Every structure is written in structure tokens, then in C-alpha cells.
Image (tube, grey):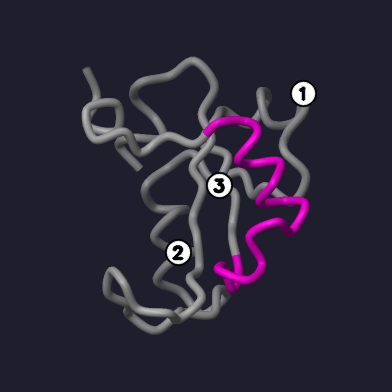
């Protein structure tokens, strides 16, 4: 069983739709959907606004490079609106959890 499953780091499709529709805007500053599937899977259809990154190098370039505005560190319970990363990988227990 993957660590994500054991720790319940999953969101439902309803929660993702609500996030995209802005229902969490009072709590969330920004969000990024990272599609970890292979290129051909992504090009076959993907979540609106998702970025296709399926290697550790590509993910590091996005998160550690200058393209993405870095949020300030936060702690649980603070009232600062968060930046959320959603990793999408259909039917895989490997790609998204290991990236």
C-alpha cells in the first residue's frame, strides 16, 4: 500500500471540482494541478489547467525554479491562505506518490 493511501492524502473528484470552481477561495491562495501521467495520456485528455510533469527533474525545475511563485512556509492552524499542489495520476500507485 502506498504512503498516500496509508496517510489518506487523496482528494475526491468532487473536492477537485470544488477547488477548480473556487469554492475554497477563502482558504486557498492558489493551486496547481500536476498531471504525472505519460505524455500520451495527458494529451488524450487532462484536467483543465493541469501541467504535465512525469519526471522528478521536471518537477524539481517547476517547484525549485523561478517559474512558480513560492508561497511562504506555513504551520497547521494558521489563518494564511495556502497554496495547494494536486498530483494527478490515473490508476497508478507509483508515479504521483513517488514524485
Q: Is residue 59 left or right of residue 31?
A: left
Q: CA distance from mark 2 to mark 3?
A: 13 Å
Mark 1 or 2, which is nearer the eye? 1
Q: Is residue 87 left or right of residue 46?
A: left
**Percent position of residue 44, x then y:** 77, 23
**Mark number for residue 34?**
3
**Mark number for residue 81?**
none
Graded by Cα atoms within 10 Å as few (under 14), some (14 to 19) or many (20 or more), the crowding at tag 1 reads few
- Provide the residue designation for mark 1: 44
Q: CA distance from mark 1 to mark 2?
A: 24 Å
Q: Secondary structure at mark 1?
A: loop
Q: Note whether 73 is above or below 6 in the view shown.
A: below
**Percent position of residue 24, x then y:** 63, 60
Q: Quadrant of the C terminus?
A: top left
Highlighted magenta segment, given as a residue range: 12-30
Contact (CB < 8 A) between labels 2 and 3?
no
Q: Secondary structure at mark 3?
A: strand
Q: Earlier in the sequence, mark 1 or mark 3?
A: 3
Amino acid at each position: 500500500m502506498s504512503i498516500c493511501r496509508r496517510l489518506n492524502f487523496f482528494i475526491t473528484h468532487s473536492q477537485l471540482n470544488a477547488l477548480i470552481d473556487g469554492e475554497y477561495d477563502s482558504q486557498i491562495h492558489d493551486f496547481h494541478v500536476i498531471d504525472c501521467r505519460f505524455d500520451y495520456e495527458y494529451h488524450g485528455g487532462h484536467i483543465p489547467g493541469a501541467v504535465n510533469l512525469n519526471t522528478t527533474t521536471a518537477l524539481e525545475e517547476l517547484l525549485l525554479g523561478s517559474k512558480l511563485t513560492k508561497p511562504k512556509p506555513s504551520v497547521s492552524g494558521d489563518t494564511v491562505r495556502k497554496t495547494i499542489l494536486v498530483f494527478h495520476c490515473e490508476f497508478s500507485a507509483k508515479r504521483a506518490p513517488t514524485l
